[in-house]
Image (tube, rainbow, N blue to C red):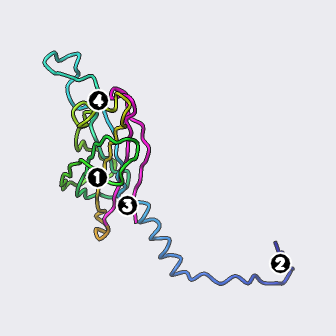
Amino acid sequence: MRRLEEGQESRKRPVCPRRSRRSGAQAVLNSERAWVEIILGSPTQPDYEDDPRSTSSGLFECAIQIENKGKTIAHVESVMVGADTTDGVIPPEPLSFYTRSFRSFLGSGQRQTISKFDAGSDFQNGQSIVNEKNVGVLRIIVKYRDIIDSSVLHQTSIVYLFKGSLEDEPERIATLSDYK
């Protein structure tokens, strides 16, 4: 590294104050935008030990929830939930899924249950997972817009794997937030 001798000036280009302020302001705006995360929460059904009328399969159940971790409001447009069994090769898109149009506004720090998942009934061939012939893939995709700049569609997706059991919590293998 070269040192400046006394009396010598640095040859750095001067920074344009207007450009610096604009990029700084954009960085602050981007850091405060809506940021939606997907969470597998406790099932929303009644506690099975307290309600003898409920029938639990004893298999993994959860509530699929979303939470806005950003500082501005998220306009959630759709939620896609897919549950597939596969021989080990995870398909790029879910084979069997449902998409729910979900016109909802989610404030900063707000959490909302969007669906439930029951491994016993949502996998069409769940026994093949227990027999270790297949793995179960649970994929959830949430599409939303930030109300500050609604021209850009953002997406958060998460993928879980069920291996050898439908009773245990699945392994999260991927989380992707497409935030432009």
Disc 3: CA contacts within 10 A as few (<14), some (14-19) or many (>=20): many
For disc 4, the marked residue is 127
* Residue closer to the observer: 145 or 10: 145
Furthest residue to the left? 53
**Residue at the image position 81 percent from the left and 72 percent from the top:** 1
Give SS at disc 4: helix
Closer to the chain start, of discs 3 and 1, is 3
Give SS at disc 3: loop
* Residue closer to the observer: 12 or 18: 12
**Residue at the image position 18 percent from the left and 56 percent from the top:** 103
Magenta extent? 153-180
Closer to the chain start, of discs 1 and 2, is 2
Q: Which mark is residue 4?
A: 2
Name the amino acid, label 3: Arg
Closer to the chain start, of discs 4 and 3, is 3
For disc 3, the marked residue is 33
Q: Nearer the viewer, mark 4 or mark 2?
A: 4
Residue 180, placed above or below residue 18: above
Tell me if label 4 and label 3 are in contact, CB under 8 Å.
no
Tell me if label 3 and label 1 are in contact, CB under 8 Å.
no
Name the amino acid, label 1: Gly
Tell me if label 2 and label 3 are in contact, CB under 8 Å.
no
* Residue 163 included in the magenta stretch of the image: yes
Q: CA distance from mark 1 to mark 2?
A: 52 Å
Disc 4: CA contacts within 10 A as few (<14), some (14-19) or many (>=20): some
Closer to the chain start, of discs 4 and 1, is 1
Tell me if label 1 and label 2 are in contact, CB under 8 Å.
no
